[in-house]
Image: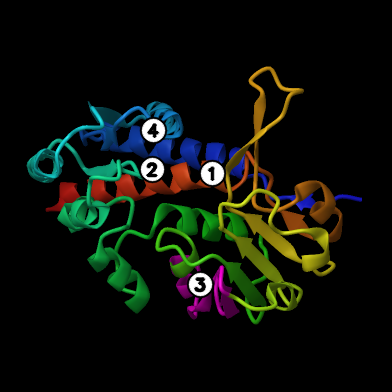
Amino acid sequence: MMGNILDGKQTSLDLQDEIARKVKSITASGGKKPHLAAVLIGNDAASKAYVGHKIKACAKAGFESTIISRDSNISQTELLQIVAELNCDESIDGFIVQLPLPDHLNSDEVLQAVSIEKDVDGFHPESVGRMALGLPGFLPATPAGILTLLKRYRIKTNGMHAVIVGRSDIVGNPIAALLRKNADPGNCTVTQCHSRTINLRDHTLRADILIVAVGKPNFITSDMVKEGAVVIDVGINRIDDPSRKSGARLTGDVDFEHVAPKCSWITPVPGGVGPMTIASLLENTLQASLSNAKS
């Protein structure tokens, strides 16, 4: 027996089609195409792949897109100048600075320099504050994608116990805040765990909805999940696999093979949360474009 699959890949494609129809309607009425820019620093293979997926999705949705690539030895001053230029470029509706940045660069300072109106990643402190207070603004793309997946599959969240394993500002903290809200999806009782949590298994076994974002392959095992739980695996880890031509494969933070039979619903890796992150980024960029058109 296998849990039902929360198919993020197909749901993301459906959302991209919906966005593409909206863009077609906008341009047919004389409006401009949304324009997303991505700043890519260095030659990290994973970062290049992620940006490539985002640019490909832009093309599918009818967006304009731009990649600003620089060597890993770029200075903090030079990177901040790029951000300042993008803030002032009226042709660009939103932009992202692909993380992680090289160690010598201050990510916090860079993200805080992004204009709130163009912060389609939802990482600016003001964006985070607006999310926490329920004010209009851009939600972080991965948590927003998780909410959309839950909504599209009509997963009941009202009154459910959600356990979050992870406390990053990109996933763990915002999804915990969003699931606590009086909203749909939302109205969960939320427990947030992390690397210092004692007796983690005791907490995860109580989860109706278990969301895992720790960056450790197969970290959640079958004895940590109760029967019928909904499991959202945010992790993307590359592990050795001699049977593959590349010598490696992607796996999540959840031991999918052994956990899936216990679940009512579960996301695969790849093909789960990752594609939903991209769809949310496009949705944020569309909203930024529409806001710019009104101003």
Towards the viewer: 21 or 281: 281
Residue topped by disc 4: 51
Q: In this view, does 175 lie above or below 38?
A: below
Residue topped by disc 1: 274
Q: Which mark is residue 74?
A: none
Residue topped by disc 3: 176
Q: Horizontal and vertical percent for residue 230?
A: 72, 63
248 displayed left or right of 174: right
**Mark closer to the chain start, 4 or 3:** 4
Query: SS of the residue at dot 1?
Result: helix
Query: SS of the residue at dot 3?
Result: helix
Amino acid type assigned to the residue bearing label 4 in the image: Val
**Mark closer to the chain start, 4 or 2:** 4
Q: Which range of residues does the magenta coloring cover?
A: 174-196
Residue topped by disc 2: 282
When asked about the image quadrant of residue 19, the answer is top left
Q: How far apart are marks 4 and 2 (CA)?
A: 13 Å
Q: How far apart are marks 1 and 3 (CA)?
A: 18 Å
Density class for disc 4 (Cα within 10 Å; few <14, some 14-19, many ≥20) is many
Towards the viewer: 258 or 9: 258
Query: SS of the residue at dot 4?
Result: helix
